[in-house]
Amino acid sequence: MAAFAKLKMTTESVHKVEWHVLEDFIIEVYGVTGYSFQADQEAGNDTVHEFSVSDNPLDEYSLDRLTEWIGKNAGMSFMTDVILNDMCYLGFIPAGTYLVNISY
């Protein structure tokens, strides 16, 4: 039997969500109709996107971006990280690592 090196790794708990479920939830929470996870992240099919989410309040810059995003009916890109952190701070979702799966 050959000796193999041990793979160095860690085991973590994560929150997994499908892209369309996240889209529907964000639209419901913020009352916007123009949000698309795929467009926001410029994401393709068969991809997984990771986000680190905390329950800390948004900094001033992120809060200003979120306010602008809502005013533009979700018409800005790369906002999902800000949105997830805001939803966590507001108590809608727990903190942690989120994996958003796109597969259709």
Image (tube, helix red, strand yellow):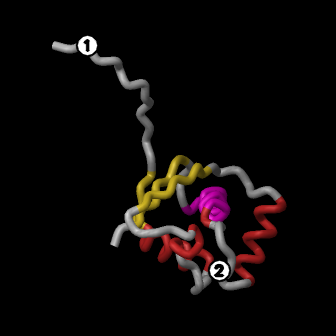
> Label 2 amino acid?
Ala
Q: Secondary structure at mark 1?
A: loop
Dot 2 falls on a residue whose secondary structure is loop
Quarter that holds the N terminus? top left
* Residue nearer the viewer, 46 or 73: 46
Give 36 or 87, whichever is nearer the viewer. Answer: 36
Return the x and y of residue 94 as percentages of the image width and height: 53, 53
Q: Residue at x 73, y 70 (%)?
A: 66
Q: Residue at x 43, y 41 (%)?
A: 13
- Taking depth in this image into account, of 94 and 36 the one nearest to the observer is 36
73 to the left or right of 13 = right
- Place of residue 74 in the rendered image (x, y in percent of width and height, measured from the top left): 65, 80
Check the image and report above or below for 64 versus 93.
below
Badge 2 density bin: few <14, some 14–19, many ≥20, Cα 10 Å = many
Q: Residue at x 44, y 47 (%)?
A: 14
Residue ID at (44%, 52%):
15
- Residue 33, placed above or below residue 5: below
Measuring from the top left, give residue 32's x and y in whole percent: 61, 83
Numbered circle sitting on residue 74: 2
Is 41 included in the stretch rendered in magenta? no
- In this picture, is 27 found above or below 12? below
Say what amino acid the circle numbered 1 marks.
Ala
What's drawn in magenta, residue-wise? Answer: 81-92
Instruction: Please rate how many residues cluster around mark 1, counting C-alpha atoms within 10 Å: few if below 14, some from 14 to 19, many from 20.
Output: few
Q: Which residue is mark 1?
A: 3
